[in-house]
Image (cartoon, grey):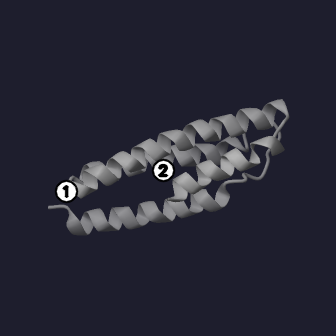
Amino acid sequence: MQVNDATTHIRSITKNYNGPLGKKRIAFCNRNYGIAVARFENAWALALNGSFPDAARLSEIGTRAVMGCENIWNKGGPAQKSPLTLYITNVSKILDIIRLLVRKLAP
């Protein structure tokens, strides 16, 4: 849900970034959050089938995509505060919970 909420937030703030660098950063985040959505959805399906290590691996990939979005705001030009920090923080915390669950549930 956090990743989906962030994707909705990206769509709502796109108009606020109309310069070339802002557009590039928003497009990068939109793409990376799309990757994250797909990975987390697949991870959920795997977890439902008991494939906890595979679910954790896909969750890690999704989280790395989200972290890439956070990092882009400090690259390629003047640093800007990321408009998605809250979502990124929440996804990172959720990944910590997923890791804990996998340790407890995986055979």
User: Are dots 1 and 2 in contact, CB under 8 Å?
Assistant: no
Residue at position x 75%, y 42% in the image: 14
Viewer can see residue 76: no
Q: Secondary structure at mark 2?
A: helix
Disc 1 and disc 2: Cα gap in Å? 21 Å
- Of the 4 image quadrants, the one containing the C terminus is bottom left
Residue at position x 82%, y 45% in the image: 16
Of label 1 and label 2, which has the lower sequence position? Answer: 1
Q: Secondary structure at mark 1?
A: loop
Reply above or below: 96 against 5. below
Residue 102 place in picture, x, y as percent: 27, 62
Q: Nearer the viewer, mark 1 or mark 2?
A: 1
Reply above or below: 12 against 26. below
The kind of residue on which mark 1 rests is Gly
Tell me, for residue 36, which label it has, or none: none
Tell me, for residue 50, which label it has, or none: 1
Front residue of this view, candidates 49 and 86 = 49
The kind of residue on which mark 2 rests is Thr
Extreme-left residue of the structure: 107
Label 2 Cα crowd, 10 Å radius (few <14 / some 14-19 / many 20+): many
Left or right: 69 as drawn, with respect to 107: right
Residue 13 place in picture, x, y as percent: 75, 48
Label 1 Cα crowd, 10 Å radius (few <14 / some 14-19 / many 20+): some
Residue 34 place in picture, x, y as percent: 52, 40
Residue 19 place in picture, x, y as percent: 85, 34
Viewer can see residue 43: yes
Left or right: 61 as drawn, with respect to 4: left
Residue at position x 56%, y 48% in the image: 67
Tell me, for residue 63, which label it has, or none: 2
